[in-house]
Image (cartoon, rainbow, N blue to C red):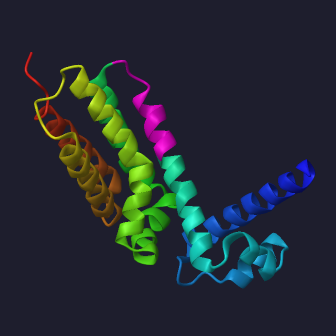
Amino acid sequence: MKRNQEETNATIRKLLEIARLHFTERGYADTALEDIVQEAQLTRGALYHHFRSKKGLFQAVLESVQQEVAEKVETQAAKSEDVWEQLALGCRAFVGAALEAQNKRILLLDGPAVLGWEEWRRMDEQHSMRLLREQLQGMQQQGQLKPVSIEALTHFLSGALNESALWIAQMADASQALEETAQMISLLLEGFRKPE
């Protein structure tokens, strides 16, 4: 029984890896399931058994991208003991990870278009936005923030980060735009710091 589960998990991982490459290179609309199953050396039936549809496969790929981005945010934020620096590092890490070639199209462009804004936001709330909210709640409990609504601030910052990533993705000089965005993040966050 354990061997069957391991084989199933290996098949799912293989399909997700191959699908991610196809969705990254071709986009959702131009990705053919037949190409994915051929490359995976599986049948369409095997794919449908695990994901039911192209949209279901894409949603699973997006979920894995969201998880990876959240892990990068946590890893970068953990590089500092200072809560303000943790917040800034996490924000920058989110934008940087969203712009990575293997994430950008899936996360920023096709994700909201294919799954719809509400489903995309729900997934975002489970990953990066959850981390942002937790950081802000901790900062508020430590008396680091001005008295503000954590929910409103979480959505405000998340929206700013998502929009910044979309803007940078369209810029000819993305590294310059990313640096400018990092400056904006620092200035913006300073406005919420409680005076000592």
The residue at the far front in this view is 1
Identify the residue shown where x is 82% and y is 59%.
Answer: 8
Is the residue 75 above or below the residue 33 in the image?
Answer: above
Q: Is residue 116 left or right of residue 72?
A: left
Is the residue 187 above or below the residue 14 in the image?
Answer: above
The quadrant in which residue 182 appears is top left
Identify the residue shown where x is 26% and y is 60%.
Answer: 163
The residue at the far top in this view is 196
Toward the viewer: 141 or 11? Answer: 141
- Image location (x, y in percent) of residue 61: 59, 63
Does the magenta stretch mainly form a helix, a strand or a loop?
Answer: helix
Q: Is residue 1 left or right of residue 88?
A: right
Q: Quadrant of the C terminus?
A: top left
**Range shown magenta:** 70-81
Q: Is residue 162 left or right of residue 70?
A: left
Toward the viewer: 82 or 169? Answer: 82
- Image location (x, y in percent) of residue 56: 59, 73
